[in-house]
C-alpha cells in the first residue's frame, strides 16, 4: 500500500515562489509514488473573516495555481475543504476529546491573541483541532510541514493517541513530518530577513507578471557592498544568493560568488540576472494559471471529482469513528 501524504494551503491569496520551490515541485514528483491528498483550506481561512466578495475568488486562484504548477487530479486527490462535509462532522467530534488548556498553550494561538486581540474567536482556539481533522480523516502517514507547524502536527499525534487509548483501539495512525527525504528548501523574503510569505509582503507570486517580478527584485534589500571578503555576508545579501542558488544555473551562481569575494560585485547586475532567471520559471506557470482560471468548466470538474474521491476516504474514517464511539441507528 502506498503511503498517504496530505498537504493543504489556506485560501487567503496567491502562492509565491517559496511555496513552489519549497514543496510544490516535490509534490509533482510524489504523485507517482504516494497516495497524495492536496486541499485548499477555505474553512481555516474563516478565522480571519475574509471578504465574502473575494472568498470564492481566492479559492479559485489557489486551485488554478495548484493545477498550473503540475498537480494532476488524475494522479492525486485535489479538493476544497468545505466540499467534504465529513471534515466538519469529525471536527465536531474531535473537539470532544480536545482540551481548552492544551489549545490555549499553542504558540500559534498565543501569537494570534497578541497580534489580533479584538479577534480572538473560537475558531482560532480550535484551529489545531481542525488541522488534525484534515490529517486524521484521511489517515495520513506523512504531512509536509514547516517549522512553524510542527507543534500542530504533534497535537495531531496527541489526538490520535488519545482516541486510540480512550476506546482501546488502533484506529488512527500517528502522522509524521515529511521533508521529501532531503533538506527542506527555505526561500527567504526580499526584505532581507525571515522567510518569504504573503503576510510579510516580501514575496514573488506565481501570478506576478514580468514587470512586477523585476520591480520587486530590484527593490530587494542589500547592503553597501563587501568591505572584507573574509567577513560573512550580511543576511539580506545572503538571502539574495540563496534565491539565486535555487533558480539560476551553477555557472551564474559561481560568477556572482567570485564577484562578491573579489569586491567587484554590482548588486544591480545581480538583481537583473536574478529577476530574469525567476521569470524563466514563473512566467510559463503564470500563463497556465491565467488559462486555467478562465476555464470554469474544467475547474468545476476538478472540484467535483476531487470532492468525490476525498469524501470516499473521509466517510469511511468518519463511519469508523462513530461506530467506535457508540453511535448506532435505531
Image: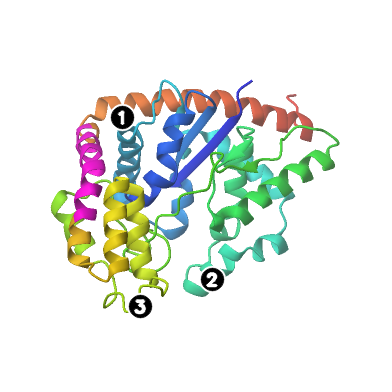
In the picture, the quarter occupied by the N terminus is top right
Q: In the image, residue 160 lies at what x, y percent?
A: 73, 42
Where disc 1 sits, the SS reads: helix
Q: Are marks 2 and 1 in contact (CB under 8 Å)?
A: no
In which image quadrant can residue 314 be found?
top right
- Which mark, by number, is residue 228? 3
Q: Main secondary structure of the magenta part?
A: helix
Mark 1 Cα shell of 10 Å, populated few (<14), some (14-19), many (≥20): some
C-alpha gap between disc 1 and disc 3: 54 Å
Mark 3 Cα shell of 10 Å, populated few (<14), some (14-19), many (≥20): few
Front position in the image: 11 or 74: 74
Q: Earlier in the sequence, mark 2 or mark 3?
A: 2
Where disc 2 sits, the SS reads: helix
* Label 2 sits on residue: 113
Q: Are marks 1 and 3 in contact (CB under 8 Å)?
A: no
Q: In the image, residue 254 lies at what x, y percent?
A: 31, 54
Per the image, is 275 magenta? yes
Residue at point 82% right, 33% down?
169
C-alpha gap between disc 2 and disc 1: 36 Å
Q: Earlier in the sequence, mark 2 or mark 1?
A: 2
What is the span of residues highlighted in magenta in the rendered image?
273-291
| Above/below status of 212 relative to 74 | below
* Label 1 sits on residue: 299
Residue at point 33% right, 32% down?
67
Q: Earlier in the sequence, mark 1 or mark 3?
A: 3
Report the label total: 3
Q: Can residue 192 be seen?
A: no
In the picture, the quarter occupied by the C terminus is top right
Amino acid at each position: 500500500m502506498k503511503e498517504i501524504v496530505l498537504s493543504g494551503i489556506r485560501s487567503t491569496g496567491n502562492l509565491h515562489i517559496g511555496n513552489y520551490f519549497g514543496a510544490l515541485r516535490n509534490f509533482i514528483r510524489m504523485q507517482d509514488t504516494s497516495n497524495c491528498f492536496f486541499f485548499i483550506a477555505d474553512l481555516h481561512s474563516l478565522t480571519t473573516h475574509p471578504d465574502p466578495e473575494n472568498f470564492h475568488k481566492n479559492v479559485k486562484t489557489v486551485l488554478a495555481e495548484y493545477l498550473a504548477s503540475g498537480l494532476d487530479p488524475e494522479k492525486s486527490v485535489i479538493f476544497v475543504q468545505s466540499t467534504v462535509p465529513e471534515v466538519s462532522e469529525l471536527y465536531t467530534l474531535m473537539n470532544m476529546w480536545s482540551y481548552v488548556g492544551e489549545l490555549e498553550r499553542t504558540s500559534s494561538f498565543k501569537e494570534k491573541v497578541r497580534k489580533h486581540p479584538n479577534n480572538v474567536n473560537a475558531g482560532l482556539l480550535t484551529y489545531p483541532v481542525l488541522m488534525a481533522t484534515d490529517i486524521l480523516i484521511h489517515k495520513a502517514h506523512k504531512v509536509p510541514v514547516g517549522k512553524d507547524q510542527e507543534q500542530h502536527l504533534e497535537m495531531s499525534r496527541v489526538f490520535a493517541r488519545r482516541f486510540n487509548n480512550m476506546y482501546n483501539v488502533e484506529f488512527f495512525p500517528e502522522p509524521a513530518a515529511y521533508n521529501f527525504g532531503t533538506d527542506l528548501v527555505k526561500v527567504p523574503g526580499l526584505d532581507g530577513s525571515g522567510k518569504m510569505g504573503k503576510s510579510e509582503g516580501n514575496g514573488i507570486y506565481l501570478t506576478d507578471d514580468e514587470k512586477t517580478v523585476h520591480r520587486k527584485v530590484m527593490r530587494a534589500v542589500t547592503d553597501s557592498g563587501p568591505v572584507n571578503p573574509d567577513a560573512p555576508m550580511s543576511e539580506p545579501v545572503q538571502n539574495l544568493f540563496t534565491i539565486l542558488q535555487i533558480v539560476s544555473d551553477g555557472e551564474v551562481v559561481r560568477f556572482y560568488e567570485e564577484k562578491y569575494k573579489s569586491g567587484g560585485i554590482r548588486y544591480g547586475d545581480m538583481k537583473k540576472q536574478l529577476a530574469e532567471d525567476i521569470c524563466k520559471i514563473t512566467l510559463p506557470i503564470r500563463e497556465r494559471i491565467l488559462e486555467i482560471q478562465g476555464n470554469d468548466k474544467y475547474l468545476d470538474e476538478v472540484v467535483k471529482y476531487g470532492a468525490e474521491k476525498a469524501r470516499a476516504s473521509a466517510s469511511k474514517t468518519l463511519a469508523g469513528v462513530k461506530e467506535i464511539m457508540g453511535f448506532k441507528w435505531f
